[in-house]
Image (tube, rainbow, N blue to C red):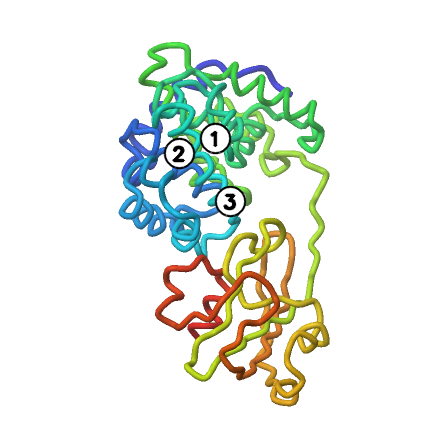
Amino acid sequence: MSGLPAGFAGRVVRWQRTHGRNSLPWQNTREPYRVWLSEVMLQQTQVSTVLDYYARFLARFPDVRALAEAPEDDVMALWSGLGYYSRARNMHRCAKDVVALHGGEFPGSAEVLQTLPGIGRSTAAAISSFCFGERVAILDGNVKRVLTRVLAFDADLAVAASERELWSHAQALLPTRGVAESMPRYTQGLMDLGATVCLSRNPNCLICPVSDVCAGSRNGNPEDYPVKTRKLKRTSQALWLLHARNAEGATWLEKRPSKGIWAGLYCLPVFESRDALQSVLPAKARPHLQDGESFLHVLTHKDLHLHPVVVELGGNALGTGQGGWFAGGDWGRLGLPAPIRRLLEG
């Protein structure tokens, strides 16, 4: 690995001012609630997807107290379709803790922010840097890519000690002058470089503001970084969905357990086999099952092969879990997994 490049932070700050992203709705503010909301939504989710969700959340929950006081079902309903639903549950818990433990004000340091639900080291640093000008490093996926290339850092990030070493380098590269003003722009600049210039494949080294101090670019092998040997294996799973409707056209939906797939969301009852699905139905209903069109839903590390099975039932409750009959007009206020919402509305 090469030494730390001189003037790196200043280059990033100057580039961000003129060429970075400066018009996103969560920028140009030092309001911690808005920055926190965007940081949580942007975890493993593209900016283009987040924009509409961010606007809807602010309209419904304009501040942290409004979010803390909201029923969980309202929060999950607005989050529906954004994925990684544990983020929404942790976000709701975090809002409650900010109100209960910190008087409705977000703590002003990354160290204390990390004690709140759902806020890890990098997210805490982003909030603290953007809102309070704290000199503290972020290290999300984009930033890891930028820094490992600049430094030709070839240690395996699947090893905890290697990641700790990169954290140390990230901290050492931070601005040292005008920190209160330069830190927010530096932090945003690293994010922007990773998202728009220092791409995973075919990085645009010719327009990169740090290419002349980047060891990866100078050596002609930027795509060799970052190094991470441990890969999560993709798996697949088949699930059967009971699409039960009553005489009025309402659908039986039940709340999923607090752990596992689609935790805490309303959903069609889920089974691991068609026989298991059939076993919960009255004997007289079983001959009338209709198999819907199966479809694939792709998660980050798992392919779900979903098999809907439709049946008309009376208005009695199903003994499959905590649930009830919901008409189409009710679906909008429920937290529904994206594939289930598409199935119901399709």
Residue position for label 3: 44
Label 2: few (<14), some or many (≥20) within 10 Å? Answer: many
Viewer-side label of 2, 3: 2
Badge number at residue 36: 2
Real-space Cα separation, disc 2 to disc 1, in angstroms: 8 Å
Mark 1 crowdedness (10 Å alpha carbons): few <14, some 14-19, many ≥20: many
Residue 49, placed above or below residue 39: below
Q: Is residue 42 above or below residue 241?
A: above
Instruction: Identify the residue shown where x is 60% and y is 76%.
Output: 294
| Quadrant where the N terminus is found in the figure | top right
Q: Which of marks 1 and 3 is nearer the N terminus?
A: 3
Q: What element carries label 1?
A: helix
Q: Do the residues labelled 2 and 1 touch (CB within 8 Å)?
A: yes
Between the residue at mark 2 and the residue at mark 3, the CA separation in whole angstroms equals 15 Å
28 left or right, relative to 296: left
Question: Compared with residue 45, is residue 176 higher up or lower down, i.e. above or below?
Answer: above
Q: Are marks 2 and 3 in contact (CB under 8 Å)?
A: no
The amino acid sitting under disc 2 is Trp
Circle 2 SS class: helix
Query: Element at badge 3?
Result: loop
Residue 144, quarter of picture: top right
Instruction: Please give the residue where the numbered disc 1 appears in the rendered image.
Output: 123
Q: Which of 174 and 234 is in front in this view?
A: 234
Q: Residue at x 54, y 82 (%)?
A: 313
